[in-house]
Image: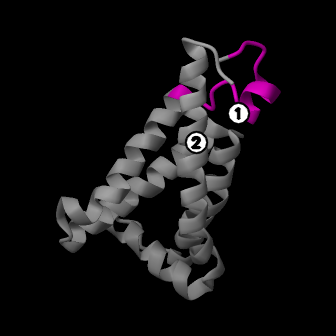
């Protein structure tokens, strides 16, 4: 398995990526299959940021971000840019819930997830992700 020091850290990153990635895939896949009606509802959240045009487009991007992004995070492929998209998606979701009056309890899932994804922007995929195998010369 893993030896010591950095090995444990990289194994922890692997568990984090696979866990959060798989759960986001499960969470986002029905939204992706929901079609234009679902995408329109999701995309309306952008109005909280002053973006009121093409809600279906923004909703589709959110559904893709959560479903495909979840898989990419789980596999550790394009981890940093994917985490950036997911961070933005979760920030929009948090603002939506807060503006809707759900309070911190209602927005907590989105806020917590945003923290995880912002962290992954800085951490990357770790040694056991495809990013490390494909794009890096060093082991990180």
Tell me residue 94's x, y (percent).
32, 59
**Quick check: 45 above or below 126?**
below
Q: Going by the image, does 106 lie left or right of 12?
A: left
Give the colouring mode of the picture: one colour
* Residue 138 part of the magenta segment: yes
Tell me residue 78's x, y (percent).
69, 39
Q: Secondary structure at mark 1?
A: loop
What span is in magenta?
123-139
- Whichever of labels 2 and 1 marks the residue nearer the N terminus, that label is 2
Within 10 angstroms of label 1, few (less than 14), some, or many (20 or more) residues? many
**Quick check: 113 above or below 54?**
above
- Residue at image position (53%, 67%) is 27
Tell me residue 35's x, y (percent).
63, 84
Q: Which of the image's four quarters has the C terminus?
A: top right
Residue 16 vs residue 136, the one in the foreground: 16
* Residue 137 part of the magenta segment: yes
Residue 26 vs residue 111, the one in the foreground: 26
Question: Which mark, by number, is residue 17?
Answer: 2
Q: Residue furthest right?
A: 134
Q: Secondary structure at mark 2?
A: helix
Label 1: which residue?
A: 129
- Residue at image position (48%, 42%) is 117
Tag 2 near tag 1, CB within 8 Å: yes
Question: Which mark, by number, is residue 76?
Answer: none
Residue 77 vs residue 9, the one in the foreground: 9
């Amino acid at each position: 398995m893993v030896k010591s020091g950095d090995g444990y850290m990289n194994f922890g990153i692997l568990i984090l990526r696979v866990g959060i990635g798989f759960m986001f895939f499960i969470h986002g896949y029905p939204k992706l299959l929901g079609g234009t009606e679902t995408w329109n509802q999701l995309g309306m959240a952008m109005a909280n940021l002053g973006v009121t045009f093409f809600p279906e487009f923004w909703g589709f991007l959110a559904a893709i971000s959560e479903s495909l992004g979840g898989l990419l995070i789980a596999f550790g492929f394009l981890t940093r840019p994917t985490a950036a998209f997911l961070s933005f998606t979760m920030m929009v979701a948090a603002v939506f819930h807060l503006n809707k009056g759900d309070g911190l309890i209602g927005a907590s899932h989105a806020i917590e997830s945003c923290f995880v994804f912002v962290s992954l922007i800085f951490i990357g995929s770790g040694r056991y992700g495809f990013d490390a195998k494909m794009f890096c010369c060093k082991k990180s």
